Image (cartoon, helix red, strand yellow):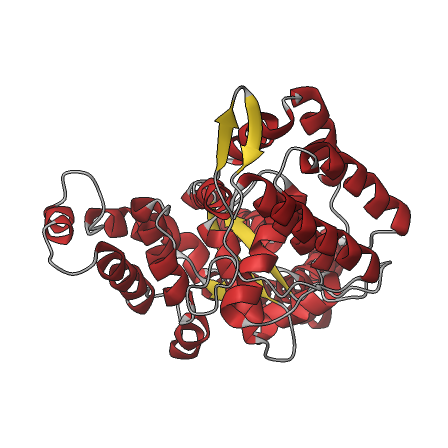
Amino acid sequence: MKFFNKLRALIFSYFNLFLIIINSILTLISGPIISLYTGINSIIQYILENKDKNDINNTKKSKIYKCFKKTSLFICLTSNITNLYINYDYYTQPIYKKFALQKNPFAKNSNNEKNISNTNEKINEVCANVLMNAIETNPYLKEEEKKYLSPIKQFFLDNEFLDYEKTYQTLNTFYIHDDLITKIKGWLYYNRNTPENIIVSAQTVYNSLADDQKNMNIYNLNLNESDYMHELFHIIGEFDNSFFNEGMVSLLTEEYSFMDDNYLIQRLVTKIIIEIIGADNMLKAYSNNNFEFVKEKLNEVNNNPELTEQFLNCVNKNKFFYSKEDISNILDYINSYKENLDCDTQNEITKYSASLYLYTDLTDNFYYNSKYKNRETNPIIINNNKILKKAN
């Protein structure tokens, strides 16, 4: 009998240890609520491990000891179950991505791809509808979340540079965490005033299990639909330069959801670069995660790759607040491109320069939303080895 009691105790100890290890790993993912579970359980384990063995022979203390053991097991089980519930999409996303790839109509050698290419409708309208259907059939999104994201359709209609296969796959599999636990986590870690008095209200996160699939966390306690659109643009496209990554996303969020954000300086400088290299070139680079293309176009204008690299390194130190000195440094670099452009473009850049100092956009230019587009940029041309912009 003693042998079986010892065996049972040994099995329980190892099983409990296993649960603690798993729980500790999952705690890194889940945040403060599960950390509380783990903390309580750790205290119980400490008490159990340091309890005098002679005390166990005491009947009364033995009951307390058994109660501690059962409580410890209960906390381990409930915390792991809670972890699995909270992170259901995190664990299932890698599996679902493989399933979604099989039905991707833009995938190579797909029958659906042939049907899309043979349709009599306008190709961009067909593709936009297919991409919106990817959002509609996404099993991780709630109906209200799909509603918040619906303005993205106009962007799909206006953007001819999307990697449709990759975008469809992303839209079909990404998830949004905007539940109470996520908001509590945001309040504890992110949704605080920064040294520059800026609140982080949302964030793009990566699921490393699913090939760094991009998803979004919404920390804002108050509903702000532009948070969803802003993070969705982060999911669809990207620059490896953090300054222009936020600037381009801020610009697109402004054009398609008509909401301002905390990235005014980044947005204004991005608009200047659009004036320099052309709106289509900037959108093409963003849609295909190819910031090197932006560098190439900038180098064509000033024929000085070293200066371009210095400029991009200067602004890549992304921050919320930019002093007058910071803005002056940025504009000094921009002037090296400005002198090679036509008069109309130079005038627009001058307006943006004034906007930067006043922290407000004086131009009200729209570059991409076809319903409100009021500014055309011209392609860069080479004339006798000199880079110029076509005159309007």
Q: Residue at x 64, y 45 (%)?
A: 343
Q: Is residue 294 above or below residue 91?
A: above
Tell me how many marks there are. 0
Percent from the top left, x then y, of residue 220?
A: 65, 72
Question: Quadrant of residue 180 in the image?
Answer: bottom right
Percent from the top left, x then y, of residue 265?
A: 73, 54
Left/right placement of residue 373 relative to residue 194 reads: left
Percent from the top left, x then y, of residue 155?
A: 41, 61
Q: Is residue 287 above or below residue 255?
A: above
Viewer-proximal residue among 53 and 275: 275
Question: Quadrant of residue 166 in the image?
Answer: top left
Viewer-proximal residue among 16 and 158: 158
Viewer-proximal residue among 269 and 302: 302
Viewer-proximal residue among 39 and 289: 289
Q: Residue at x 15, y 53 (%)?
A: 116
Left/right placement of residue 11 relative to residue 70 reads: left
Is residue 107 visible in this depiction of the protein?
A: yes
Percent from the top left, x then y, of residue 7?
A: 49, 48
Is residue 5 visible in this depiction of the protein?
A: no
